[in-house]
C-alpha cells in the first residue's frame, strides 16, 4: 500500500484543486478552507466543496444501503435498505460503522428510504453535529404517483421527520423515477416548490434530487438554478463526454454530485463481504481502485458506497490517500473486474451499463 500512497505535498495539492473546482464564472474559494468549519475534520481525509451549498464534504461518504449486512448480523431481517432497524445487533452495527466514519473524517450520510432515515437518525443521536444527513422518504416521493404534488410531498416529508424524530435534515433530495424524463415539467416544478418550502422553513438546509436519467438531470440543473445537489450513478467505468456532458452542466451551475453504485451493486467483487472471505484482499483492492478512479473526476463531489463493517470504512478512507492515477496493472485488473461485473449484473441493475459515457 505504501507504494500507492501520495506524498503529503501531492495530497494537499489535489485536495486544494478539488476544493476549488467551482462553476464557471464563480471565483475560486481559498485553496485551504477553514478547517474549523469542516465537520469531523481529519487531516488524512480530503474534502471537496459540495457545489453552491458551500459545505466541505469528505471525498468518500457513507451510502445509506446496507447490502450484505447479514454477513455481520446473521439474524437480522434487513435487506439492502429495508428491514427491522430496531434489531439490537443491526443498531450496534450501524452505530459502529457511523462512529468509524466520523473517526476517519467522513462527514455525510445519504439516507434514501424510510428505513435508512430512521436507522441513521438513531445512529447519529447525540452527534448530529458530526455528519451531514441526507434525507429521502422515497416510498412517498415521485416514484409513487400519489406524491407528485408539493402538498403531498411536504406532508410525507413532515411524516418522515416525525417518524425519525428529527426537527430538520441537512439535505432533502427527492427520489425521482429512474427515467425521470417521464415526469412532466409540471411535476418537476411541484417537487421544487416542496423542496424550496422546506428550505424556507428551515427544515432542510439544502435541496436536491436523485435520478438515473442523465439527459433529464442536465436539463433540470440548467433550467432550475435552485437545485443544489444531484445524487446519481457513477461507477468504475463512467467517463465524462468531451462535450455536452452532464458534468459540464453541473460545473457551470455549481451543483454538488454524490455518486451512487460505485461498486456496481457489489457486482465488482468476487467475495461476499465476510472478513474471512478468500477474496477479501482482492475485493479490498478493487474497492480502493474504484474509489480512486471515481475521484479522478473532480466534478464528482464524492462516491457514496454502502458499507457494512468498520473494515470497509477504513478501506475506502485509505483509498482517498492513494494516488489517483491507476498504473497499467491496476487499470487492467479493474477493467477485468468490471467486465465480470457487467456479465453478472442482475436485471434491475442493467441500467448501469448506460453510465459509461456521461
Image: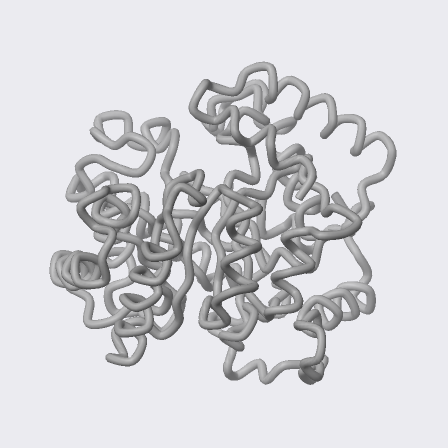
- The one nearer the camera, 356 or 327, is 356
In the displayed structure, does residue 92 sit left or right of residue 217?
left
- The one nearer the camera, 309 or 241, is 241
Figure label count:
0
- Image coords of residue 342 (percent x, y): 60, 21
In the rendered image, the residue lying farthest to the right is 328
Q: How is the image coloured?
A: one colour
Taking 272 as reference, is 37 above or below it?
A: below
- Image coords of residue 310 (percent x, y): 45, 45
The residue sitting at 63% across, 81% down in the picture is: 33
In the displayed structure, does residue 99 sit left or right of residue 269?
left
**Is residue 311 visible in this depiction of the protein?**
no
**Is residue 106 visible in this depiction of the protein?**
yes
- Image coords of residue 82 (percent x, y): 25, 37
Taking 75 as reference, is 295 above or below it?
A: below
- The one nearer the camera, 265 or 239, is 239
- The one nearer the camera, 160 or 92, is 160
The residue sitting at 54% across, 24% down in the picture is: 267
- Image coords of residue 279 (percent x, y): 59, 21
In the displayed structure, does residue 28 sit left or right of residue 164?
right
Image quadrant containing the C terminus:
top right
The residue sitting at 52% across, 54% down in the picture is: 258
Image quadrant containing the N terminus:
top right
The residue sitting at 63% across, 50% down in the picture is: 318
Taking 148 as reference, is 336 above or below it?
A: above
Amino acid at each position: 500500500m505504501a507504494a500507492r500512497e501520495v506524498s503529503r505535498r501531492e495530497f494537499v495539492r489535489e485536495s486544494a484543486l478539488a476544493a476549488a473546482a467551482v462553476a464557471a464564472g464563480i471565483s475560486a474559494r481559498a485553496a485551504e478552507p477553514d478547517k474549523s468549519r469542516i465537520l469531523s475534520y481529519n487531516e488524512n481525509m480530503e474534502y471537496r466543496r459540495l457545489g453552491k451549498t458551500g459545505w466541505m464534504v469528505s471525498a468518500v461518504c457513507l451510502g445509506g444501503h446496507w447490502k450484505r449486512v447479514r454477513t455481520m448480523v446473521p439474524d437480522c431481517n434487513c435487506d439492502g435498505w429495508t428491514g427491522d432497524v430496531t434489531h439490537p445487533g443491526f443498531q450496534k452495527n450501524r452505530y459502529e460503522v457511523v462512529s468509524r466514519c466520523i473517526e476517519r473524517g467522513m462527514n455525510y450520510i445519504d439516507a434514501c428510504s424510510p428505513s435508512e432515515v430512521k436507522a441513521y437518525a438513531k445512529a447519529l443521536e447525540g452527534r448530529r453535529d458530526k455528519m451531514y444527513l441526507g434525507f429521502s422518504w422515497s416510498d412517498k416521493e415521485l416514484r409513487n404517483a400519489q406524491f407528485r404534488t408539493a402538498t403531498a410531498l411536504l406532508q410525507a416529508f413532515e411524516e418522515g421527520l416525525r417518524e425519525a424524530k428529527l426537527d430538520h435534515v441537512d439535505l432533502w433530495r427527492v427520489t425521482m423515477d429512474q427515467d425521470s424524463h417521464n415526469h412532466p415539467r409540471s411535476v418537476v416544478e411541484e417537487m421544487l416548490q416542496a423542496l424550496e418550502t422546506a428550505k424556507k422553513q428551515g427544515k432542510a438546509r439544502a435541496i436536491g434530487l436523485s435520478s438515473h436519467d442523465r439527459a433529464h438531470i442536465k436539463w433540470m440543473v440548467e433550467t432550475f438554478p435552485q437545485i443544489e445537489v444531484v445524487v446519481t450513478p457513477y461507477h468504475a467505468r463512467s467517463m465524462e463526454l468531451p462535450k455536452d456532458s452532464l458534468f459540464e452542466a453541473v460545473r457551470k451551475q455549481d451543483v454538488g454530485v454524490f455518486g451512487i453504485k460505485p461498486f456496481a451493486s457489489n457486482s465488482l467483487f468476487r467475495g461476499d463481504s465476510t472478513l474471512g472471505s478468500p477474496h477479501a484482499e482482492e475485493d479490498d483492492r478493487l474497492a480502493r481502485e474504484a474509489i480512486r478512479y471515481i475521484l479522478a473526476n473532480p466534478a464528482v463531489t464524492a462516491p457514496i458506497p454502502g458499507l457494512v463493517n468498520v473494515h470497509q470504512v477504513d478501506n475506502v478512507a485509505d483509498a482517498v490517500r492513494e494516488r489517483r492515477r491507476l498504473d497499467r496493472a491496476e487499470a487492467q485488473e479493474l477493467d477485468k473486474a468490471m467486465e465480470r461485473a457487467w456479465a453478472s449484473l442482475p436485471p434491475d441493475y442493467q441500467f448501469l451499463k448506460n453510465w459509461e459515457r456521461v
